[in-house]
Image: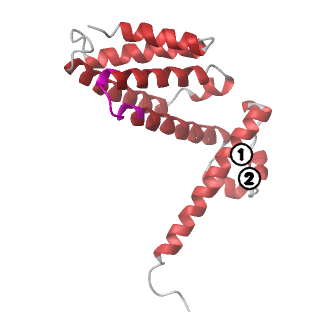
Amino acid sequence: MLYRGSVPKLWDDTIEAHRRSVDEAILTATMALVVEHGVASVTMSQIAAEVGIGRATLYKYYPDVDTILVAWHERQIGAHLAQLAQIGHRPGTPWARLTAVLAAFAENSRQQRGSELAALLHRGEHIQRAQAHLRSFLAGLIGEAVATGEVRADIPAAELAAFCLHALTAAGTAPSGAAVHRLVQVTLAGLRP
């Protein structure tokens, strides 16, 4: 006899939790293999074996290694944007929150400094969307600081946000945390009235 009625919500939740779990395992295993063997050496067969699933199952989730890497990168970017948003919404003056966000952005840029993987992943639509979101968020913080007189009002907030992001991307080549701090201070000085 066929099941008559809708699938229970618990069943849907269980299936979705399983899918998320497998997806997480795929992303984690892929990155472990990339770290161990390098980007160009990782295959779908290796990933499937590492996760403990068949290749056919893996292909139901992702068509190729590059797509897995992009999915992992999107997750990393999402976590970074969430972290910056959390910092930006903490209590404090607009200037203090802006300073903290720019420092966190710069430090993240330093930690992600140029690698074969970074060169592969820092292109594409997901990067453009993240950059637009970040510019908009930062422009909002800058606008708040303009309103309190802590940031110059003679240049539009959107232009200042772009300036900050471009300047602090240079932290990717900074040799130390102290160098990152100096770069943040120079950038902040350019924002003052």
The kind of secondary structure element at disc 1 is helix
For the residue marked with disc 1, what is the amino acid?
Ala
Q: Magenta stretch containing residue 29, yes or no?
A: no
**In the image, is 131 to the left or to the right of 32?**
left
Q: Measuring 44% from the left and 80% from the top, which residue is drawn there?
A: 6
Q: Magenta stretch containing residue 94, yes or no?
A: yes
Q: Which residues are magenta?
A: 87-95
Mark 1 crowdedness (10 Å alpha carbons): few <14, some 14-19, many ≥20: some
- Is the Cβ of the residue at disc 2 closer than 8 Å to that at disc 1? yes
Q: Which residue is mark 2?
A: 51
Task: Using the image as rendered, state which of residue 1 and residue 6 is in the foreground.
Answer: 6
Q: Which residue is mark 1?
A: 29
Q: Quadrant of the N terminus?
A: bottom right
Q: Position of residue 92 (x, y in %)?
A: 32, 29
Q: Quadrant of residue 76?
A: top right
Q: Quadrant of residue 68?
A: top right
Q: Position of residue 122 (x, y in %)?
A: 55, 26
Q: Quadrant of residue 167?
A: top left
**In the image, is 113 to the left or to the right of 48?**
left
Q: Position of residue 81 (x, y in %)?
A: 45, 34
Q: Earlier in the sequence, mark 2 or mark 1?
A: 1
